[in-house]
Every structure is written in structure tokens, then in C-alpha cells.
Amino acid sequence: MNVLEKYFTDFTAEQQKQFDALQGLYKEWNEKINVISRKDIDNFYLHHVLHSLAIAAQFELEDGMQVMDLGTGGGFPGVPLAIFFPKVSFHLVDSINKKLKVIEGVSQSIGLKNITTQHTRVEDIKARQFDVVVSRAVAPLKDLWHWSKPLLRKNKNNNEAPNGLICLKGGDLTLEISESGCKPFVWEIGKIFNEDFFKEKYMLYQPLKK
């Protein structure tokens, strides 16, 4: 938890309690359903929680917004963001149902009310629209944008709130971005959080064009 408090100083008592509980709950669930490697469990708050909160450090999600976490895995970045933005609705989607069971168990244990889950492939989601799609290390940008774009609705009320795809990625992204046809904004996470772990890790934002 100390690494979170190094960069965020205004958690409510409820948020503090929820973040404090996460590592123990994920350790417990991980013994039944493996969603996090042992190395990552030992560095849980840095590798998973703070990494997810890079989005919160850069973007202000407004109350009432609808956000989809595409390929959420064990719940990242969706679970930490749902704690950070308790008045934003998060819909966490994955094609592997047992991972969603972990998310549902963790959410129930900490009283997280703003998360829903869906066991599906993103291509099969119909009749749902979101203000933002988030994703962490799931697929090439070209695919993420192809899947996300039909599910995004134009934000007509506030041009400052994000409205598009936000994804967390690592490594040399030059070719991937070129092949995607997108022109995303790119941030080095190591410049947001001064930690060695975030070297060569990036946050990309592809807005939905008006």
C-alpha cells in the first residue's frame, strides 16, 4: 500500500480499507484460481494496482460515466479504477469465466457496488455503449480499436472527460501504432510514477473523433 500513498494522498477511509484488503483477497483467490503470478503477487500493489491507477493519474472519469474493461483478466485495471472512482460504472468483460469469479468474489468482499461482469468475447457484445474502454496488455492496438469503436458513444457534454480507448502497454510500440492506423496520445508511465518497473511501459489514448 505504501507505493499507492506515495502518489495518491486523498483516499477516503472506505477507499483505504478497500485497497488495503486487495492483496490478501487476491492471494486467497489465487490459491483456487491462478490469475496472478507469484512474482506479481509479491509486488501486487506496484505491478497491478498502481499500474492500473496510471489511468486515474492522467484522466478524470466523471460521475455517472460507463466504462468497459476489455479482457479484464483478474480485474485490472477495472477493480482499482472502480475503487478510485466509486460513482463511475465499470463493466468488466473476459472470455474466461473463472477469472470473473475472482473479480466477483473480491468485489463482494470489499463491498464494491459499481462493477458488473460479463463472460463473453467483446465482439459479441450488442446493444451496449460506453464512454470509455480501458484495457491492459490484451491485444494489438489495431484489434483493440476495432473492437472498441462500435461500443463507444460520443460524449456530447464535456470535451475534457475522456471519450475513447485507453490502454496500458509495454515495449516498443512504433510498429504496432503504425499498423493500427490510429494516432493515439502516448504517455510514458515511468514519468507519471517514478518506479523502475514502469520503464518501457506506456499508456495510450485513442479518442473517439467527433
Image (cartoon, rainbow, N blue to C red):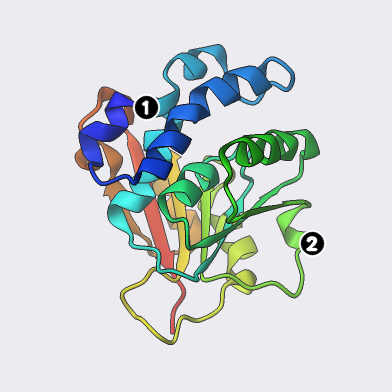
Disc 2 crowd, CA 10 A, few/some/many (<14, 14-19, 20+):
few
Q: Earlier in the sequence, mark 2 or mark 1?
A: 1
Mark in front: 2 vs 1: 1
Q: Quadrant of the N terminus?
A: top left
> Does residue 186 show up?
yes
Q: In terms of image quadrants, where is residue 193?
A: top left
The residue drawn where x is 29% and y is 55% is 58
Residue lying farthest front?
A: 13
The type of residue carrying mark 2 is Asp
Q: Secondary structure at mark 2?
A: helix
How many angstroms separate mark 2 from mark 1 (CA)?
33 Å
Residue 126's spot in the image, x, y percent? 77, 70
Q: Please state which of residues 207 and 89 is positioned toward the viewer in this rendering.
A: 89
Disc 1 crowd, CA 10 A, few/some/many (<14, 14-19, 20+):
many
Q: Which mark is residue 46?
A: 1
Above or below 200: residue 161: below
Would you say 73 lies left or right of 119 here? Answer: left
Above or below 69: residue 162: below
Q: In terms of image quadrants, where is residue 7?
A: top left
Above or below 62: residue 40: above
Q: Secondary structure at mark 1?
A: helix
Q: Please state which of residues 140 and 59 is positioned toward the viewer in this rendering.
A: 59
Could you tell me how many numbered marks the image carries? 2
Q: Which mark is residue 129?
A: none
Above or below 184: residue 200: above
Residue 85's spot in the image, x, y percent? 43, 56
Residue 190's spot in the image, x, y percent? 25, 36
Q: Which mark is residue 124?
A: 2
